[in-house]
């Protein structure tokens, strides 16, 4: 077996962690993704590989994660419950671990209606909380979901989950976070923070319940590329809240891209100073070349060895 | 009840093909209650089929017959005398009724006139909504009488996904988020501990993932 999760080590040593996200291509052509991977190499501790995000068919997250491993990056394998049942998911997780993947992010998944195959049957055999609990069962109790023992080589993943502080009643999101932690989540990546005030209230409730002591919370940051991108996220992406002042800043900017970078840097610095936030998760959505700049200009470069 | 909707006429006549003697069979059960399969709807459909063929210049013979419940064998035998010489029957029952009709008469060609949509009820003058997915393992006592299997678009068992916008489902802003409603109801009842309990993966084998549903009642004899 190969070494354990480096992301876990970085967090456990108390460093402010940096992860970013990469969406695999809508083809079997991996060169573009590899170029992006090379660009962020050294600037992030791990790279999330999305699992058919927005329910659009793409190269599988497992294959994408293996490509990143070969490039010398540490992947976080995203696994959703939308397309696979408990048999397929557990099988993939055994396979991924055998290939050297050590981090997994458990998600429910965007509904198939949003994607490019809206007539598909959604699986949702499990939900994300149950999935976290199954992966925890692998390492803690060395069992499959059905209770059957894993006789040898039980995967020992660094288990992540997501939380969206911007959706529905705030106290409910905190209770759900608590549930995910009880199920076995060791790190949490949040939905993109634009609404800092709400995020601060969320983190305050999180601290009140001592949840920041029980898991590592990485705040999500999306560098907005333009006013249009910000409006799209606000109106079309479920669960993202973009305050008006951000939209206005992008509208009035002479160079919206530069303004987007400035906004992202401000957000990174702001979340860094919130107690209980252990890292930042940059979701550049196709604009990955901006990641090194965001990391170095917020004092987060070089990354710990 | 079972809620169904009428198929478009074009689809029904296409399925009838060259059949020229057609009997439309209504059902006085669920589909009559949701105004799609009753005796009145059978008359309307029979006339529509007749008119369709008349416009096309093709002679066709249609009739109607009412059945109390097509999903009950004892109500089907009495219509046998109406089937003589019939090329096809058009059933206004749900998928269960259509199949019971086909099973009762081995040589009868059966065409469904409805699409069976779900188990639900009427929530507005002209609106029906699903309430039960028939999972065979009811958990409504844990969720304040609101079914997450049916009413959450992802059938989640441990709370809402991150997509809920305000209090609405991410897939349709006219659908309330089941989990936010469950949360509020449990909170009002002072039973939030139910919300916090981790619900283990569900045994879907008792519902439609487990193959043909069958129920033997050994405690019951005729």
Image: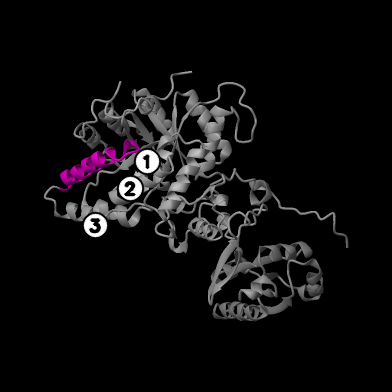
Local packing at callout 3 (Cα closer than 10 Å; few below 14, some 14-19, many 20+) is: few
> Does dot 3 land on a helix, a strand or a loop?
helix
Tags 1 and 3 in contact by the CB under 8 Å rule?
A: no
Q: Is residue A266 magenta?
A: yes
- Estimate the x, y position of residue A281 in percent, counting from the top left: 33, 37
The residue that appears at 65% across and 78% down in the rendered structure is B42
Q: Are marks 1 and 3 on the same chain?
A: yes
- Estimate the x, y position of residue B182 in percent, counting from the top left: 53, 58
Query: Does residue A142 lie above or below B202 as drawn?
Result: above
Local packing at callout 2 (Cα closer than 10 Å; few below 14, some 14-19, many 20+) is: many
Where is the C terminus of chain A found, in terms of image quarters? top left
Which of the numbered marks, if any, corresponds to residue A199?
2
- Estimate the x, y position of residue A130 in percent, counting from the top left: 54, 41
* Residue, far left: A254
Q: How many callouts does the rendering have?
A: 3
Please identify the quarter of the rendering in which residue B87 is found. Answer: bottom right
Which of the numbered marks, if any, corresponds to residue A26?
1
The answer to whether residue A303 is seen in the rendering is yes
The residue that appears at 26% across and 51% down in the rendered structure is A229
Query: Does residue A27 lie above or below B56 as drawn?
Result: above
* Mark whose residue sits in front, 1 or 2: 2
Pointer 2 chain: A
Does residue A42 appear to the left or right of A118 in the view shown? left
Q: Is residue B127 magenta?
A: no
What's drawn in magenta, residue-wise? A256-282
Return the residue nearer the eye: B111 or A24: A24
How far is the residue under mark 1 from the one under mark 3?
33 Å
* Mark whose residue sits in front, 3 or 2: 2
Query: Does residue A154 lie above or below B187 as drawn?
Result: above
């Amino acid at each position: 077996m190969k070494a354990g999760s480096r992301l876990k080590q970085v967090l456990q040593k108390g460093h402010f962690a940096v992860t970013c996200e990469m969406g695999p291509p809508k083809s079997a052509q991996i060169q573009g993704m590899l170029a992006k991977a090379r660009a962020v190499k050294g600037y992030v501790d791990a790279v999330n590989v999305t699992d058919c995000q927005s329910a659009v068919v793409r190269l599988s997250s497992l294959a994408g994660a293996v490509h990143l491993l070969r490039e010398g990056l540490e992947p976080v394998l995203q696994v959703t419950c939308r397309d696979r049942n408990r048999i397929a998911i557990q099988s993939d997780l055994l396979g991924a671990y055998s290939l050297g993947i050590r981090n997994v992010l458990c998600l429910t998944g965007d509904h198939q209606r949003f994607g490019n195959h809206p007539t598909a049957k959604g699986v949702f055999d499990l939900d994300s909380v149950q999935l976290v609990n199954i992966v925890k069962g692998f390492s803690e109790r060395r069992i499959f979901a059905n209770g059957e023992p894993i006789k040898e080589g039980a995967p020992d993943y660094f288990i992540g989950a997501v939380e969206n502080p911007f959706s529905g009643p705030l106290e409910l999101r905190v209770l759900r976070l608590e549930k995910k932690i009880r199920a076995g989540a060791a790190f949490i990546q949040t939905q993109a923070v634009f609404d800092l005030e709400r995020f601060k209230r969320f983190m305050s409730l999180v601290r009140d319940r001592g949840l920041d002591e029980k898991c590592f919370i990485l705040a999500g940051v999306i560098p907005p590329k333009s006013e249009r991108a910000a409006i799209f996220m606000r109106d079309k992406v479920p669960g993202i809240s973009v305050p008006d002042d951000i939209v206005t800043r992008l509208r009035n900017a002479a160079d919206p891209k530069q303004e987007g970078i400035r906004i992202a840097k401000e957000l990174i610095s702001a979340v860094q100073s919130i107690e209980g936030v252990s890292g930042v998760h940059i979701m550049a959505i196709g604009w990955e070349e901006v990641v090194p700049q965001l990391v170095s200009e917020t004092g987060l470069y070089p990354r710990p060895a | 009840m079972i809620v169904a909707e009428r198929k478009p006429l074009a689809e029904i006549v296409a399925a009838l093909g060259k059949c020229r003697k057609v009997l439309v069979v209504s059902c006085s059960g669920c589909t009559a209650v949701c105004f799609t399969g009753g005796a009145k709807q059978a008359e309307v459909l029979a006339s529509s089929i007749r008119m369709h063929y008349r416009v096309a210049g093709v002679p066709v013979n249609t009739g109607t017959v009412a059945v109390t419940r097509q999903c009950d064998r004892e109500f089907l035998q009495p219509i046998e005398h109406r089937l003589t010489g019939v090329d096809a029957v058009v059933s206004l029952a749900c998928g269960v009724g259509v199949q019971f009709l086909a099973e009762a008469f081995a040589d009868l060609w059966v065409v469904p006139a409805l699409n069976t949509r779900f188990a639900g009820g009427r929530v507005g003058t002209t609106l029906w909504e699903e309430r039960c997915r028939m999972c065979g393992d009811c958990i409504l006592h844990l969720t304040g009488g609101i079914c997450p299997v049916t009413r959450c678009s992802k059938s989640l068992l441990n709370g809402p996904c991150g997509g809920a916008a305000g209090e609405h489902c991410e897939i349709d802003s006219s659908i309330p988020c089941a989990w936010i409603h469950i949360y509020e109801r449990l909170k009002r009842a002072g039973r939030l501990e139910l919300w916090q309990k981790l619900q283990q993966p569900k045994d879907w084998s008792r519902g439609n993932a487990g193959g043909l549903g069958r129920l033997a009642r050994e405690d019951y004899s005729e």
